[in-house]
Amino acid sequence: MTQAIDAVSEFIATEIMHDSSDTKIDPDLGLLEEGIIDSLGLQQIITFIEQQFKITIDDDDLMPENFESVNAIAALIEKNA
């Protein structure tokens, strides 16, 4: 699960937040609550997850709680792996 946490955290920092430094995102940070990801960012994350981890995110998994934090996203990846 650490690999998923690191990959998702790096993707969010570089592609969503456009931060080129070595920013580490707190895995428990509320990404939706803090406004870090919006609907476009969510679509980018889903596409990244499906390509990076070779999984499919089902419509049933498209719930806010599955994308609330890096830890929640990593758990979703693990569940679908």
Image (cartoon, grey):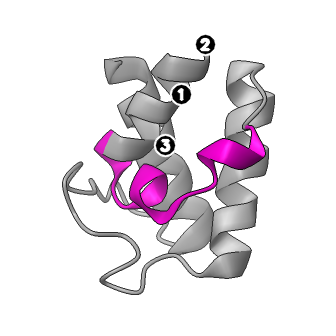
Q: Which residues are magenta?
A: 58-71
- For the point 27% across and 53% down, the residue is 24
Residue 14 is drawn in which quadrant? bottom right
Which SS class for mark 2?
Answer: loop
Q: Which residue is mark 1?
A: 77
Of label 1 and label 3, which has the lower sequence position? 3
Q: In the rendered structure, are the residues bearing label 1 and label 2 in contact, judged by CB atoms less than 8 Å apart?
A: yes
Q: Residue furthest front?
A: 60
* Image quarter of residue 38: bottom right
User: Of the residues shown, which amino acid type is indicated by label 1?
Assistant: Ile
Q: Residue at x 74, y 63 (%)?
A: 43
Q: Main secondary structure of the magenta part?
A: helix
From the top left corner, tell me how far across and down residue 48 is, in percent.
72, 44
In the image, residue 5 lies in the stretch drawn in magenta = no
Viewer-side label of 2, 3: 2
Q: Which residue is mark 2?
A: 81
Identify the amino acid type marked 3.
Val
Whole-angstrom CA distance, mark 2 to mark 3, is 15 Å
Q: Give the quadrant of the N terminus.
A: top left
Looking at the rendered structure, the kind of residue marked 2 is Ala
In the displayed structure, does residue 51 sit left or right of residue 71?
Answer: right
Residue 8's mark?
Answer: 3
Indicate which disc, 2 or 3, sits on the residue closer to the N terminus: 3
Which x, y percent locates residue 49?
67, 37
Q: CA distance from mark 1 to mark 3?
A: 10 Å
Residue 47 at x, y = what percent?
79, 48
Q: Residue at x 55, y 51 (%)?
A: 11
Residue positioned 36% across, 48% down in the render:
70
Q: Is residue 40 left or right of 79 when viewed as pictured? A: right
**Secondary element at tag 3:** helix
The answer to if 69 sits in the magenta stretch is: yes
